[in-house]
Amino acid sequence: MYYRLNKKYEASKDYLYKSISIATANNLDHELSETYEEVILLHKDMGNYTEAYNTLELQTTLKNKLLNIEKINTISLLERKLALSEKEKEIEREKLNSQKAREKNQLLTYALIAMCVFCIFIIYLFIKSRKLMYVFKVI
């Protein structure tokens, strides 16, 4: 940028194309896009509109690629969030089902205890009435 603004176009061009080589070799797409922007401005300042347009097409293609990657990452993130949400709902359902089963078992236990107490009471009354009948027979 410094060289371009000071109209040292050849130096600017050399550094920008070195930057493109380094960014391409290291898969630095965002930096490559920024470098393309500077190359476009350089060619525009030099009057090389064809080169500026060609570089603009490269930059547009790269920006579309970056945008698609960003969309894919966003979709992937949303899918993970959805899967996590569904898993959490499933866990909540399982907890609720487990709680209902415990409550049902507890109710059955109380009913069984009540029936046992009732049976013991009936047996007690039966034995008491037998003793009473025996006492009346003896008299």
Image (cartoon, grey):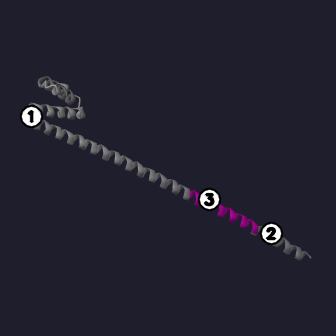
Near-viewer residue (71 or 83): 71
Labels 3, 2: front one: 3
Looking at the rendered image, the quarter that the C terminus falls into is bottom right
Q: Which residues are magenta?
A: 101-121
Circle on res. 51: 1
Q: CA distance from mark 3 to mark 1?
A: 82 Å
Q: Residues within 10 Å of mark 1 (few under 14, many from 20)?
A: some
Above or below: residue 130 compared with residue 24: below
Comparing 119 with 88, the one in front is 88
Instruction: Give the class, few, some or many, for how many residues have Cα within 10 Å of label 3's Cα (few <14, many ≥20).
Output: few
Asked if residue 111 is among those painted magenta in the image, a careful observer would answer yes
Q: Judge from the rendering whether residue 133 lies leftward or rightward of residue 100; answer left or right.
A: right
Is the residue 116 above or below the residue 82 in the image?
Answer: below
Q: Position of residue 97 (x, y in %)?
A: 51, 57
* Spatial CA span between label 3 and label 2: 31 Å
Find the distance from the CA under tag 1 to the CA under tag 2: 113 Å
Mark 1 / mark 2, whichever is N-terminal: 1
Q: Which residue is mark 2?
A: 127
